[in-house]
Amino acid sequence: MNYEDDLGAPVWDDLAPKPENDPTVDQLAQNLGDLSSTEHAVSLEHSAWSEDGGEKEDKHKEAADEEGPESSKTLLSSLAPEEDPLSDLSASNVITSPTKDDPLFSGSTKSPLRVSDSDFTARISETSLSSRKYGKPQRLFSSTRLRRHPLTDEQKKDLFVDPLAIKGTTQDDDFVDESLEYDTEQASSKQDIMQQVDAPLFKLSPRKSPNTTPHVKHIAQPDNDEELSNSSKQVEESSNEFVIEVVDPVKVGDLTSAHMEYTVWTRYQNTDNPETRVQRRYRDFRWLYRQLQSNNWGKIIPPPPEKQAVGRFKDDFIENRRFQMERMLKKIAQDAELQRDIDFVMFLTSNNFSQDSKVRENLTGSNASSDSNDISEIHISEIELLGEEDAVNVMRNGGIDESHKGFMSISFSSLPRYNEPDQFFVDQRQSADILEEQLRQLYKSLELVDTQRNELASVTEEFAQSVKPLEELEVTKEGSTLLSNFAEVHLRLKESLQRSSMQEALTLGVTIDEYLRSLGSIKATLNQRAKLGYFLMIVENDLNKKQSQLEKLNRNMKSHTDKINATTKEAQILQKRFSKIKQKWQDIGETIRQELSKHDQEKVKDFRNNMEIFLESAIESQKECIELWETFYQNNL
Amino acid sequence: MTSAIPYDPYDDIDNNPFSEPQPTSVAPEAESAVATEAQDVHEGPLTQPSEQPDLQPSQEGHVANQNSNSTTTDQAGPQSEQDDSLLPERKLNKYKLVVKVTGLERAGSVTNKKENPTIIFDVSTNLPTFRKPQHRNLRKTLDEFQNLFKFLNGAIPETFIPAIPPPRTSYGISNQEDYQRTVSNFQMWFDRLCADPLILRNEEIAFFMESDLNTYTPVGKVKLPAAGLKRKTLKQLAPPYDECIELAEFRPLVKSIHHQCQEIQLKLFKLCKLKKTLSADENGVGKGFAEIPIDVAQKHGKMYKRFGKTLTAVGDIDSVIATLDMATLHDGLEWIVQDTYVVKEAMTNRHFLMRDLLQAQQNSKFRQEQARKLRAKRDVSPLKVDEAIRQLKYATTVEHELTMKLKRTTANMLLEKQRWLDWYSAFLSTSVKEYTLRKIEYERKKLSLLERIRADVRSADENGGLSRLGRSRSTTSSDLHPSQTAHGDSWAGDARRRSQAFESDVLHTEFDDALCRDEAPASTLNPEDQHALDARNAATLLGQSTF
C-alpha cells in the first residue's frame, strides 16, 4: 500500500476479513475528502480552546457556513460521541485473540476511533446539538477507564460533569481550525493573482463573537478596529486617525544651495486618498509654523527645531532635527483645531508646495517667509485682523501704526505703550521667563553631565586596558585572573555608562528641549496679544482724534459738508476697525487662558513621566553595577 | 670582664662595641681555602684552577639545592652545609623583634604635617644589639625612617628592604581614615622588616630605635656599591652573565611590574579626577531640578525639591566614591611601585657585585701571572717577591670575599624573591578587595537614596506613575520596600546572607540628615511587615532559584 498517496487508505493492514468497521472507515475517508473539497475546516470541540478563539480576527465570514457545521458536526460526533465509546467495550464482546496467521495490527482490533453505523445515523438526527445547552459534555478523549461491567444508569448519572463545558459553549465558539488542504483551495478558487498577493498569508478562521467566559467580568470590550491599528507599527494614534512620519533625509542641490529634504508620509483615514508622500525641507516646516501662528492666534503651536547655519549635515544633527520635526507634526495632528487648518493640510498634501505656499502667504498676509530664529517674534497680519478690504487700505497706507512710524521709521510722536490690563498675562509672562531660564540651566547641566559621562566611559576603558599588561606579566596565576576580571568589570561598567547617558539624553534631554521651545511658542502668543493691544490703542487714539476732529468740524459752521462727510466716514471706518480689533483682542485673551491651562497639564505630566523614567533607569543601572561588583568579589576574592 | 650576656659560641652577632669591621663572615671551607692559598703561593697556579672548578660546581649545587632545604638546621650533606653556612642567620630563628605601632602624630608646619609625621610605637625584642628588651612609646619621624632605609639599602645588599610607606593617604590628613590607614601601613612595614633575619641582625636598627626623637643619623657609613653617574653609566651596559636564571628573569619582571603599576596609577588618577568633576555637575543638575518650583507655583513643588536634593546627594556620593578609589587602589599601587623600585635596585646592586667579582677575578689572574713571571725570572729581588706575594694574596682574598658575598646574595635573594612575590600578590589582592568593598558599599548607598525618591515621584501622578500602566489601582505600599535587605537583594537570584548591620549601613547614608530636613519624619516600616506574606511575596519566594 502506498501510504503517501492515498490518505484515505486505511492505516492498518486489511488482509484480514474486515469486520463491520470497514465501511465506516471508508465513510470517514469520504468525509475527509468532502471536507477538503468544500473548503471547510474540521471542527473539534474543546471548551478550553474556544477562549483562544477570542484572538482570532473577524475578517472572513465564510459564506458556506451552513454546510460546514453539518458535516463537521457529524465528524465531530463521530470523534467525540456523546456516549462513552468505551462503554461498549465490555469484557463480553472485546477479545478475539489474534490467531497465528492474523496480522498483528489488523482491522479486527478495536480502534479508539470506533464509529459504528448506528452511531452515525443516530448522530445525524441530533443536529439540534447546539440548541441544547445543558447536554452532556462531548468528551473527545475520555479518561474513563475500561470497565469490565458497563456502568449502570445510576452510575452514569453520578459521573462528573464538567461545569465549564456546559454554559456558553455554543457552536459559535467552536475552535475553528485552519484547513490543511491548502493547495486544492488555491487551485479551485478563481481568485485574481493580485488578490492573492494581497490576501493574507494564512487564512485565519472566522472568529466568532466572544461570549465564551460568562463568569468572568468583561473588563473592556476591545474594539476590533482599534486593535488592528494598534498592532500596526505606527506610533501615536490620534483620535482622528492621523499617522505621520518624517523619514528619509536626502541631500539635495549643489554646493551653494545644498539642503536636506525630508519625506513626509501621511496616512489620513478620513479622506479619499489615504496616503500621501511629499518632500519638504526645513524651511517649509518653519513656514508652516508661521502660518499656523498667523491663522490661529493665541494657540500654542508645537514648535519646530532651531535654525543652525553651521554643521547642518552632520548625522546626529540631521537625526535630531528629523525627530523634532516629526514630533511637531504629530502634535499638530493631535490638536482638534489645528489638524483642520488649511495650511496644515496643504503642507501635508501639496505637490507644488513652493507656489502654493506663496499664494497662501499672500492671501493671509502672514509674512511667513521672513521668520527670525526667535519663534516668539510674531507678525500680525492685517488681513487676518481686519478682513480683506479694510486691510488692503491699511496696508496701502503702511500699516495700522503708520501715523506713528513716520518718515523712515522715525516717529515724531511717542509710541503709546501697551500695558497689559490683565494681571494674569503679566504673571504668565514672568513665570514663562523664569521657567525658561531655569530650564536652560538644567539643560546645560544635563548636557554637561552627558558629555562627561561619555568621557568617563572612555577613560574607564583606558584604565581597563592599562590593567591588561600587568595581567599579562602573569606574576601569579590568581593575580592574573583577578586582574583580568577586574578589567572586565570595568569594561562592562563603561558600556552601561554609555547606555545610560544616551538614554538620559534621549528622554529627559528631549523633553526639556521641547519644553523650552514651546515656551517660545507661549511667549509668541503673549506677544500676539500685546501687539493686538498695541494696535487697539493706536486705533483708539486715531478714533479719538478723528472724533474730536469731527466735533470741531461740526462746531465750526464754516466747514464744507463733504469734508464733514469724509471725516464722518473715516470715523466710522475707524470705529469699525476699533471694534474688530477689540473683539479679536478679547478673543485672544480667552484662547490664551485655555491653551495655557491645557498646556500646563500636559507638560507637567510629560515632565514627571520623564523624571520617573530617568529615575528608574538610574536605579536599574545602579543595580547592574552592584551586581557586577558583587559577582567579581565573590569569584575572585 | 664578665658581661651580662652569656657567651654563646653559635652567636654570630658580634656585640663587641670596639670591634672593627672584619671581612664578612665566611664559610669554614672558604676560610680554609684562603689559608691554603696563602701558604702555597707557588702552587698557586695549580691550586687555583682546581679550586675554580670547585667553586663553580658548588655554586651550581647551591642553585639546585636552594629551594629545598635552606633553613634546616641539620647538616645533611656538604651542600646543605654550604647553604646554612652561607646564610647562618637563617639557621636559627632565634632572634625576634616585635614592633607595635600605636599612633601617629602630625605637628609642625603644614608641609611637616603632611610629609613628616611622627610614628609612635612599642618594641619588644631579644636581640643582643638592643640595650633593653622592651621599649614603649618610641617616637620617630619619617625623615629618620628614611635615613635608616638608605643605610640599610647600602649595608645589606643581600636582601630587599621594604620601601617606606607614603606619609599620607589620599583621604587627606585631617581624616580619621587616613590616620588608621597610615598606622596600619607602618605596622605592615615593621612586620616585613622583622620577618627578615638579616635586617634584624643589623645594629642600626637598634640604634635607630633607641635614639631620641629627631636625633638619629646612621652610625655606619652609608655606602652604595655605585651611585650617581657611575651607576647610571654602568646600568647602560649589558648585565653580566647570571647563572641563576630565576634571578636573571626576576629583574625584568620587577621592572615591568613597576612601570605597569605606574601606568595604572596614572589612569586611575585621571579617572578619579573626572569622576569628581562629574559629581560636581551632577550636583548642578540636582540644583537645577530643585530650583524649578521656586517662583513658579507648580503642583509638585515638593517632589521637584526632593528630587533635586536626592540628585545632589547622589553627586556627593560619587565624589566620595572617587576619593575612595584613589585611597584604596592608588595608594596600594603606590606602595607596590616603590617597593618594586627598591627590589630592582637591589638586583642592580647584585649585578654590580657580579661585575666587581669579574674584575676581581681578572685582577687575581693578573697577579698570578705576575707572580709566575717573577718566578721564571732570574733576577729575584726579595722586595719584589714580597710585593708580588702580597698583592697576590690580597687579590685572591678580595676575590674570595666577593665570591662568598655573591653566593650569599644569590641564595638570599632567591628566598626573598619567593617571599616578595607572595607579598606582592597578597597585597595587590588586598588592595583590589578593599577597593571593591568600598565601592560596593557606596554604590549600594546610592541605590538606596535613589529608591527613596521613587515613592514620591510615583505618587505625584494620579495613576501611580508609569509603573502602574495597565494595572488597576491596588495597594502600592508593597512595592516600596527597599530592594536591598538583610535577606538579600531583591534582584539577585541567590540570597546572600548578610549581617543585620548591613541594612543600617546601606540604607542610611551620611546625607540622610540633609535630605530629611524638610520632610516629615517618615514612618519606618515595621520590619515584620516586610516579611509579611502576601500573594506577591509568596510568589517571589517560590520563584527564587536556590541554585
Image: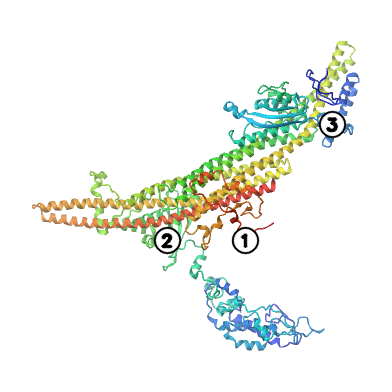
**Amino acid found under the numbered disc labelled 2:** Gln
- Chain letter of disc 1? B
| In the rendered image, the vertical position of residue A546 relative to residue B370, given as above or below | below
| In this picture, residue A394 sits left or right of residue A226 | left
State the mark number for residue B397.
none
In the structure shown, which secondary structural element does the residue marked by tag 3 occupy?
A: helix
- Asked if marks 1 and 2 fall on the same chain, the answer is no
Tell me, yes or no, whether the two marked residues, 1 and 3, touch with CB atoms within 8 Å: no
Q: Nearer the viewer, residue B489 or A202?
A: B489
| In this picture, residue A542 sits left or right of residue A130 | left
The residue where tag 1 is placed is: B538
- Chain letter of disc 2? A
Distance between mark 1 and mark 2 Cα atoms? 45 Å
- Asked if marks 1 and 3 fall on the same chain, the answer is yes
- Chain letter of disc 3? B
Q: Nearer the viewer, residue A79 or A203?
A: A79
| In this picture, residue A283 sits left or right of residue B38 | left
Image x and y of residue B160, in percent: 74, 31
In the structure shown, which secondary structural element does the residue marked by tag 1 occupy?
A: helix
State the mark number for residue A334.
2
Image x and y of residue A457, in percent: 58, 45
**Amino acid found under the numbered disc labelled 3:** Asp
Q: Quadrant of residue A389?
A: bottom left
Number of other residues with Cα within 10 Å of mark 1, as a class: few under 14, some 14 to 19, many 20 or more: few
The residue where tag 3 is placed is: B83
| Residue found 55% across the figure and 71% down from its top | A55
- Asked whether residue A131 appears in the rendered view, the answer is yes
Q: Earlier in the sequence, mark 1 or mark 3?
A: 3
Quadrant in the picture for the N terminus of chain B: top right
